[in-house]
């Protein structure tokens, strides 16, 4: 079969859009379709974790994301007798030299998706709405059956990516199992316009009583309030204004809170499920198609975006001639992350049912790494500092001209980055697509504050090879830099994609 496009993406949520942006900025032909008639309009995944903010900085949208939302407010825990206690459930952390985004940021999911679609449009792409995948046949290429309200068609592609949610059609057509379990009663989440609520706080009622819990959270950057509440496990749930008002009255004991409008609402049953495989031939799963989870801790949307971010540069590299084995590392790296995320979000759900909403560093995803990845190399093996497979810390430098420059500015884009500390070792033989920077007292970048040396535990002559997705791929000590070049070429025999 002749190939009509390199990559077909099914699903235009956060994961599908992130993948499309990654392919578009690397010049890889793709199409992105979605069975929905148009864009999602609700708040759902409203928490953007610090690691995802770093991803958005690389994609060129972080300023728009920050402008669209705001920080998490502290919580008011309301007592049955009408009293209340202020609680800082989301641990705050400021920006540092190595972690420029210290705390999660609240943005409605619909706004996040709108910003990603805008970025995709700037790169010449667009979502094909009302287009459903109906069939997948793998041979020399992949034949994907499509259906719109007016016609049925087919497209051939090299790779298909299912980013089509927890009820993934692609996963079903592949016959990939999705084991797991449901997690008790259903929950309602709704975006409300209402008055009488102090918008400076996230309000919680009846914590510890699962039959009567209620949370009302102002959605930063909007005039909306997000309602979260467990509801009956069975039966129809009315979601009109009067019914939502009655729910609030019953669970607050009567108040001055008045609902004016229900802008969006969903009643769902929480589950924790993980696909047995992320790859079948040349078809891949990302995001909720690969894992579903309770919403506690704000992990799901962020994990989904980082799935796509991980897969995107690898697909582009293989389309440019890299060895297909590079794509096997996607599941090797991302499936263990989802497995840990499901455990974390389930533990946080159990704590939330008891009224404990505290969230710490474990939810920020800055410490996620790929310790068992086949894409890691150390020569010699390190016993200290960051290891190959870890997230690359940021750092500040002073240039020869006295200006300040961040390491994340150097790594932004499609390339690999080699940072060499206090060495003049020759790097002319490095393949195209690797940006080489020397750090040292008499070099291009001066580690005047010692941030880089400290963050990387760098010794004279050390080289750190940073992947396009901001993880350390390989580390070599003095006299071993050429081994980094051989490591890179072994995965990208046709040269790094530029």
Image: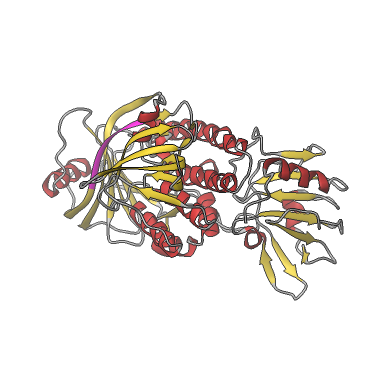
Relative side of 414 to 201, left or right: right
Color encoding of the figure: secondary structure
Residue at image coords 37%, 47%: 45
The quadrant holding residue 119 is bottom left
- The residue closer to the viewer here, 380 or 242, is 380
Residue at image coords 51%, 45%: 306
Residue 472, x across and y down, in percent: 68, 46
Q: How many marks?
A: 0
Above or below 151: residue 412: below
Above or below 74: residue 267: above
Q: Taking the image as drawn, is residue 168 in sight? A: no
Work out which quarter of the rendered image holds the C terminus and state it: bottom right
- The residue closer to the viewer here, 432 or 434, is 432
Relative side of 124 to 42, left or right: right
Q: Main secondary structure of the magenta part?
A: strand
- The residue closer to the viewer here, 49 or 74, is 49
Work out which quarter of the rendered image holds the N terminus and state it: top left
Residue furthest out toward the bottom:
401
Q: Is residue 457 magenta?
A: no
Residue 65, x across and y down, in percent: 44, 60
Give the magenta range. 265-271
Residue 484, x across and y down, in percent: 77, 45
Residue furthest out toward the front:
1
Residue at image coords 43%, 37%: 142
Above or below 157: residue 448: below
């Amino acid at each position: 079969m002749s190939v009509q496009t390199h990559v077909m993406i099914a699903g235009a949520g956060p994961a599908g859009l992130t993948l499309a942006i990654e392919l578009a900025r690397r010049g890889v032909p793709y199409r992105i379709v979605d069975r929905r008639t148009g864009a999602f309009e609700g708040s759902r995944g409203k928490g953007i974790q610090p690691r995802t903010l770093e991803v958005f900085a690389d994609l060129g949208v972080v300023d728009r994301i920050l402008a669209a939302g705001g920080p998490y407010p502290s919580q008011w825990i309301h007592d049955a007798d009408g009293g209340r206690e202020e609680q800082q459930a989301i641990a705050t952390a400021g920006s540092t030299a190595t972690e420029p985004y210290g705390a999660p940021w609240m943005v409605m999911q619909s706004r996040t998706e709108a910003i990603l679609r805008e970025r995709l449009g700037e790169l010449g792409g667009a979502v094909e709405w009302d287009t459903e995948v109906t069939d997948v046949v793998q041979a020399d290429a992949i034949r994907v059956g499509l259906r719109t309200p007016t016609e049925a068609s087919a497209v051939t592609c090299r790779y298909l990516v299912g980013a089509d949610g927890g009820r993934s059609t692609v996963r079903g057509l592949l016959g990939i199992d999705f084991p797991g379990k449901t997690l008790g009663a259903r929950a309602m989440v709704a975006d409300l316009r209402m008055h009488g609520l102090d918008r400076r706080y996230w309000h919680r009622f009846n914590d510890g009583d699962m039959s009567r819990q209620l949370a009302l959270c102002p959605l930063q950057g909007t005039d909306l309030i997000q309602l979260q509440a467990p509801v009956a496990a069975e039966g129809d749930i009315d979601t009109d204004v009067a019914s939502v008002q009655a729910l609030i009255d019953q669970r607050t004991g009567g108040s001055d809170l008045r609902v004016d409008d229900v802008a969006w609402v969903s009643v769902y049953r929480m589950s924790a499920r993980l696909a047995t495989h992320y790859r079948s031939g040349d078809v891949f799963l990302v995001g909720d198609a690969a894992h579903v989870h309770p919403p506690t801790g704000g992990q799901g949307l962020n994990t989904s975006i980082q799935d796509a971010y991980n897969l995107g540069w690898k697909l582009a590299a293989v389309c440019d001639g890299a060895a297909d084995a590079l794509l096997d590392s996607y599941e090797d790296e991302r499936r263990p992350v989802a497995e840990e995320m499901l455990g974390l979000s389930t533990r946080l759900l159990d704590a939330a049912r008891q009224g404990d909403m505290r969230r710490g560093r474990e939810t920020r995803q800055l410490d996620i790494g790929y310790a068992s990845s086949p894409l890691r190399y150390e020569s010699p093996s390190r016993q200290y500092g960051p290891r190959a497979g870890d997230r690359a810390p940021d750092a500040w430098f002073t240039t020869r001209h006295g200006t300040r420059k961040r390491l994340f500015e150097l790594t932004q884009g499609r390339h690999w980055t080699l940072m060499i500390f206090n060495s003049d070792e020759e790097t002319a033989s490095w393949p195209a697509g690797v940006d080489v920077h020397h750090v040292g007292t008499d070099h291009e970048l001066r580690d005047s504050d010692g941030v880089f040396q400290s963050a990387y535990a760098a010794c004279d002559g050390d080289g750190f090879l940073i992947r396009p997705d901001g993880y350390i791929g390989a580390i070599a000590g003095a006299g071993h830099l050429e081994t980094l070049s051989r490591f890179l070429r072994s995965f990208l025999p046709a040269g790094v994609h530029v």
